[in-house]
């Protein structure tokens, strides 16, 4: 039987946010981050689970894949895998995965159909190759990329650096399938104690992560840092970044910053350093916005391009993105929804499709719903497990959007599970917690019952795309919740639960063409309340990845204060026995393990 499709597999490997993306004839068939499967946030290590998920969803085996392209920002994948043979590197390949890796056909593969790609090039392909533009420019800004010696693309001689310098920023021009590097910004090696060089690297994204470590004790809390920034006072901290003549300067980090958050120092929320942390958050956010805006303006003036694509971890800074969209002079700005390292799996796959297989671009990423669908039988099975069945009441609805809108208008917190999951760090309406934004206290209700986040962190709004400009300032679209916009003054008292302290909101626009069920839910809610907006936050609790499966949804529902769970067309409520069984579950084990242990044997 002749082969029907051409498949390319892209991988982000070993360090944080391991992921896989499968292309079918140049279009994304499926993509997943390992964390959604293993339930370990930002999961690192071997990539088998992510590959198996995509192959099983497509109904193929690895033998059907024509090309595999992988990347890792630490080292080229073949070199890293060679080192993993003789070094104990538990952060990249934990002991339980070593044996599994040694048997896998892609581990240390010598096949000609297995290729390694450098990091910023993977980010760049992840952005332009699936964008709606035939030509334009690309900004890639992240914490740290590959060593200069491992960079694969040609770049201007003026940007030369030492072999051990690391990628920090990369700027490109594209037309059709062709990509040209216009500028590279490298970070020279930094002196550090043992392995803390990253903490001291003089780069844009690295500095933001440095402040995140300083304030939260975690380099990967950049989203929280962005949310904290509006609480800070202007100009209370010296500049942490400086631009002159197009050159970025990062002043030395000195002992005047002597109030770091220490993990064993007590409650973060009650720290006497809070005012200082707020001020430094304001400073690093303001400096970052100004540098990014200067870079984007330079790119626009240098090339005359009308279209800008953005990727890299810094592209998740929706406040900076909003300023770029409004002030940099581009007609259109498009941000890859999985802009962080998980999204490099997309870039790897498209590098293979366009550069190695010499195919044409034929796909636009209009939405991020590229997980696998779950059947009604799988939903039913999740509800039939014994310790679930005794705690819930479930009923089918003949109009799930109408009935859910009524629950929302009655101030119920809803777990919303529909269709394939979203790829990337943001819940975009298929794995979401949703609620009514008309009461300011709904933010506190969500935090106390489910999210358990710091009180300063805002919640994002879903809005009908055609109503966006009526409620929020700015014409730019924001389908992936990656652009912050000011809320118009006349709407701030109508939807207070999504208005941040600075009057802004991290907007997600919803269109019928890309998510008809979510669009209809918003229409039904508007019909009841006159408000075409809902609160949207990720369906998970603090410290856990966004849910993936119906079982994940049920577990989170039963373990939290979510009022109702919507699984496809089924409305799930907590029954009378929930108050009896739930304390026992909390006492004797977590919901997930107990529910799994009471599952009926497979038929």
Image (spheres, rainbow, N blue to C red):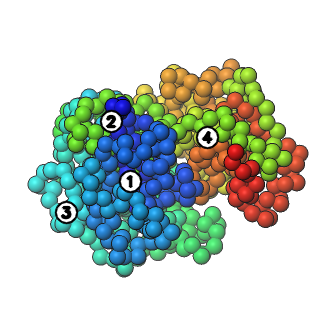
Q: Secondary structure at mark 2?
A: loop
Q: Residues within 10 Å of mark 2 (few under 14, many from 20)?
A: some
- Quarter-of-image position of residue 553: top right
For marks 3 and 1, the one nearer the N-term is 1
| Label drawn at residue 149 | 3
Picture layout, residue 129 above or below residue 187 = above
Side of 370 relative to 384 (left or right):
left
| Label drawn at residue 273 | none
Q: Secondary structure at mark 1?
A: strand
> In 3D space, how far apart are the residues under numbered discs 2 and 1 (Cα atoms)?
20 Å
**One can see residue 425 in this view:** yes
Q: Which residue is mark 1?
A: 12
Quadrant location of the C terminus? Answer: top right
Q: Which residue is mark 4?
A: 432
- Quarter-of-image position of residue 108: bottom left
**One can see residue 468 in this view:** no
Quadrant location of the N terminus? Answer: top left
> In 3D space, how far apart are the residues under numbered discs 3 and 1 (Cα atoms)?
20 Å
| Label drawn at residue 6 | 2
Give the mark toward the camera: 1 or 4: 1
């Amino acid at each position: 039987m002749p082969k029907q499709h051409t498949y390319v597999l892209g991988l982000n490997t070993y360090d944080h946010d391991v992921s896989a993306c499968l292309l079918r004839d140049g279009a994304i068939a499926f993509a997943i981050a390992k964390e959604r499967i293993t339930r370990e946030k930002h999961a690192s290590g071997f990539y088998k689970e992510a590959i198996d998920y995509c192959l099983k969803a497509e109904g193929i085996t690895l033998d059907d894949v024509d090309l595999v392209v992988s990347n890792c920002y630490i080292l080229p994948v073949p070199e890293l895998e060679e080192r993993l043979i003789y070094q104990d590197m538990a952060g990249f390949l934990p002991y339980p995965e070593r044996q599994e890796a040694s048997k896998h056909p892609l581990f240390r593969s010598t096949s000609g159909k297995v290729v390694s790609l450098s990091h910023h090039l993977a980010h760049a392909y992840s952005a332009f190759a699936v964008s709606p533009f035939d030509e334009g420019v690309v900004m890639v800004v992240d914490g740290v990329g590959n060593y200069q010696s491992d960079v694969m693309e040609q770049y201007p001689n003026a940007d030369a650096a030492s072999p051990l310098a690391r990628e920090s920023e990369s700027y490109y021009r594209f037309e059709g399938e062709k990509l040209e590097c216009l500028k590279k910004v490298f970070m020279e090696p930094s002196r550090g104690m043992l392995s803390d060089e990253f903490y001291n690297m003089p780069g844009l994204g690295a500095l933001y992560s440095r402040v995140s470590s300083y304030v939260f004790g975690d380099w990967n809390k950049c989203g929280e840092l962005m949310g904290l920034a509006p609480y800070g006072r202007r100009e209370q901290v010296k500049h942490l970044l400086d631009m002159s003549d197009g050159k970025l300067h990062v002043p030395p980090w000195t002992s005047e910053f002597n109030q770091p958050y220490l993990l064993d120092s007590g409650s973060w929320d009650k720290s006497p350093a809070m005012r200082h942390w707020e001020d430094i958050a304001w400073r690093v956010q303001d400096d970052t916005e100004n540098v990014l805006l200067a870079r984007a303006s330079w790119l626009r003036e240098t090339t005359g391009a009308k279209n800008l694509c953005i990727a890299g971890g810094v592209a998740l800074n929706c406040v900076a993105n909003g300023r770029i969209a409004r002030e940099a002079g581009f007609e259109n700005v498009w941000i890859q929804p999985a802009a962080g390292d998980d999204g490099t799996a997309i870039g790897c796959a498209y590098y293979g499709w366009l550069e190695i297989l010499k195919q044409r671009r034929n796909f636009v990423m209009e939405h991020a719903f590229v997980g696998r669908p779950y059947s009604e039988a799988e939903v039913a099975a999740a509800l039939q497990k014994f310790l679930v069945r005794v705690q819930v009441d479930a009923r089918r609805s003949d109009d799930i959007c109408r009935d859910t809108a009524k629950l929302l208008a009655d101030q119920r917190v809803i777990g919303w599970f529909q269709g394939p999951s979203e790829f990337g760090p943001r819940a975009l309406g298929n794995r979401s917690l949703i609620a009514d934004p008309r009461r300011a206290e709904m933010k506190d209700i969500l935090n106390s019952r489910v999210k358990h986040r710091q009180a300063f962190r805002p919640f994002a709004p879903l809005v009908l795309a055609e109503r966006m400009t009526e409620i929020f300032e700015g014409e730019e679209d924001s389908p992936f919740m990656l652009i912050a916009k000011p809320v118009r003054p006349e709407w701030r008292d109508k939807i207070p639960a999504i208005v941040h302290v600075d009057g802004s909101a991290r907007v997600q626009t919803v269109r019928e063409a890309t998510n008809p069920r979510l669009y209809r839910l918003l229409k039904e809610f508007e019909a009841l309340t006159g408000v075409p907006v809902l609160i949207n936050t990720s369906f998970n609790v603090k410290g856990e990845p966004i849910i993936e499966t119906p079982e994940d949804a049920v577990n989170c529902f039963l373990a939290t204060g979510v009022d109702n769970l919507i699984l496809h067309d089924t409305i799930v409520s907590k029954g009378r026995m929930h108050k009896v069984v739930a304390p026992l579950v909390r006492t004797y084990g977590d919901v997930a393990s107990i529910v799994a242990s009471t599952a009926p044997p497979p038929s």
